[in-house]
Image (cartoon, coloured by chain):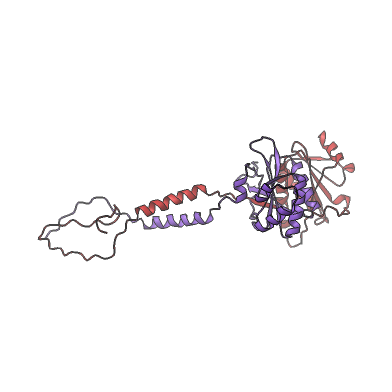
Chain colours: A purple, B red
Amino acid sequence: MSKIKMKRTGFVLDMTPLVDIAFLLLTFFMFTAKFKSEAESEKKFQIKRPKAAADTSKLPDKDLAIIQIAIDSANQGDTSYYFSMTNTEDRKAVYSKVEGLTAEQREKNLVKVSLNLLDALILQSRLQNLKTKYAIDADKRIRYSWVNNLTNVMRKNKANVFNYVTDKRQGNREKQ
Amino acid sequence: MGGGGGSLGPQPKAKRGKNSKRKKKKRVGFVLDMTPLVDIAFLLLTFFMFTTTMVTPQIMEMKLPQADEPVEVIEDDLFSILIRKDDSVFYYRGILENTQLQPVTLKALKTVCIEENMRPGKENKTITALKSDTSASFGRLVRVLDILNEAEMDIVKKMSGQKRERKFTLAPVDPKELEAMKDL
């Protein structure tokens, strides 16, 4: 009658909660992941954004025209303006109307432009869609004159409201 | 089914002797080997965790007054903040002929700004003008703007209940101001 005691080999661990959490995290990261936009994959520069106090304001992604001022990583010290728009339809219309863009540039989103061309682009984008918002995404190391010239051009075209793109400052605010 | 189970599932029990009195257990449900599924899930999880960048850019909104509309300003209402070539900051009130430029550290700037805006009777009248030398860095300008925004929050708090109208503009530096800043 006596039962033979089985020798225990290994053990069984219930993995269900672990797998649950793993899938939860997986779905979270999958849905929050944002892939590089068209403009980002074209660019050959890195912008060191100035830091500002944490804020809830986010860059709008509808009808946005971004003017980037960056130091070219290949040519040190060579600063230039780059223009791009998020609204594809508006972009096509604007790029086709502005003179001075090459055929190759018209196909792209991110274009390297001069200040004069920027003037035409801003004017045209405002004519195309008055709701267009403007963002200036400039490297913190550049001289202010670059931003100043751009601001003057924007004011000339009555684009008085615009945004500076910044990064969140983490931790101690006295650290730059 | 059956023998293919991994280490996780309950193993089918080994048959014992012929005269075992145990009845054959009726099989309910089935065992599915989850190991490859979990492997892939973790692989994807680590991939997405490492490729996600948590810092998203934020924005600082600027509203500038119309460029071609001259505004009449009372001298005493004007509060100017200047940024010199080497990124140091100065301020003065009114017009330059009647006053002195004061050097100010970034730490003290917030207090100064609040004081200037909270002068009795001038709460909503003070116009802050930020003037940056074109050779100063853009980073410094944003830093000063950030301090002004922080000061603004305090001002709104202090003026509890009253309506606050912020008056702010970016302006070019005057040659006279450049001259005055040079020797400080």
Question: In x, y percent, where is residue A25?
Answer: 47, 55
Q: Is residue B118 visible?
A: no
Residue sitting farthest toward the top: B183
Instruction: Give whichever of A68, B178 is nearer the camera.
Output: A68
Q: Name the residue rendered at 16%, 65% in the picture.
A: B23
Relative to B155, say whether B21 is above or below: below
Q: Name the residue rendered at 72%, 42% in the picture.
A: B138
Left or right: A8 with respect to B170?
Answer: left
Q: Name the residue rendered at 43%, 54% in the picture.
A: A22
Image quarter for residue A173? top right
Image quarter for residue B124? bottom right
Instruction: Give whichever of A97, B151 is nearer the camera.
Output: A97
Residue sitting farthest toward the left: B19
Instruction: Give whichever of B169, A158 is nearer the camera.
Output: A158
Question: In x, y percent, where is residue A52?
Answer: 66, 47
Relative to B99, say whether B164 is above or below: below
Question: In x, y percent, where is residue B155?
Answer: 74, 54
Question: In x, y percent, where is residue B60?
Answer: 69, 52
Residue sitting farthest toward the front: A103
Q: How many marks do you count on the picture?
A: 0
Q: Quadrant of the C terminus of chain B?
A: top right
Q: Quadrant of the N terminus of chain B?
A: bottom left
Relative to B177, say whether B74 is above or below: below
Q: Name the residue rendered at 77%, 49% in the picture.
A: A119
Q: Is residue A66 visible?
A: yes
